[in-house]
Image (cartoon, helix red, strand yellow):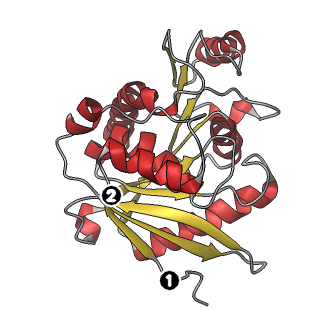
Amino acid sequence: MNNRAPAVVVGKCSERSRFLSAIRAAGLGLLWVVAAEPAAVEAQSAGAPSITETTFTLPGGEEMPYAISVPDGYDGSPANARPLVLALHPGGSSYHYGSWFMQALVEPALRDWGAVIVAPDVPGRSWSSPDSETAVLALLRDVASRYAVDPDRVLVTGFSAGGAGVWYLATRNPDFFTGAIAIAARPRDDDLEALASFPFYIIHSPDDEVVSFDAAQEVARSLTDRGYPVRFRSVPGYSHYSTGSYVGPLRDGGEWMMERWQIGAATVQ
């Protein structure tokens, strides 16, 4: 069965003005919007990716909108398999909200990875639910069947409600994902013992107005004390509502994750 609807190719989206135009057209306003500064985008050495917006048909027949970013120079060669990134948007809803989130934060931050990035709209009311888990895993398996991606480099990242989804998915699927970066979020009723050998990077601001910095930091300390591969990054001065301003910290988290993956690959060899 073909799970994909006709696609809309957004094209080479790397300009800050294009992000803001798309957001205004969608009626999102500026609540979550502080897009990446032009200098942050231009600092990337890789070319702009190709971004396509489409939908995925879920097992029950529902359509889940998502965007996919394919890196510049991608040739589909299994010998040059790319990292796979799942990007989970913060709370809110509008058509292809995940696409905005990916273009405002995740893609600029991780562009130098040369990754295939997948950014769905939440299929229900929360990323932290069995139905959402089933939906995004089905989507990722579909993408992995069509693109040359590396199963040893599969990242889940998200912001706020999306960050809570990161904790949810990582703790329940440590054999599918190989790393996680949660931003402005903390775990809920998640089994943290599943992260014993799982690289996890946490980004949080002490000035966050919504999610407790102390709670997130305490979780990070607890996991570090257990010897888990966790890194906590404090970013003073960052508002919970300035999503795109986290490009730099996410880029740093990506560098740490790549180092962890390289250490793991060397250990296996």
Q: Is residue 259 above or below residue 25?
A: above
Tell me: 71 left or right of 10.
left
Indicate left or right for 223 with 238 as reference.
right
Quadrant of the rendered image containing residue 95 = bottom right
Q: Residues within 10 Å of mark 1 (few under 14, many from 20)?
A: few
Q: Is residue 165 left or right of residue 22?
A: right
**Residue 269 shows in the view:** no
Q: Looking at the image, is mark 2 or mark 1 nearer the viewer? A: 1
Say which quarter of the image contains residue 159: top right
Secondary structure under the numbered disc 1 in the rendered image: loop
Label 1 belongs to which residue?
A: 6
Q: Which residue is located at x 71 percent, y 31 percent?
A: 193
Q: Kindly identify which residue carries mark 2.
A: 82
Question: Compared with residue 58, is residue 38 higher up or lower down, i.e. above or below?
Answer: above
Q: Is residue 28 above or below residue 163?
A: below
First along the sequence among labels 2 and 1: 1
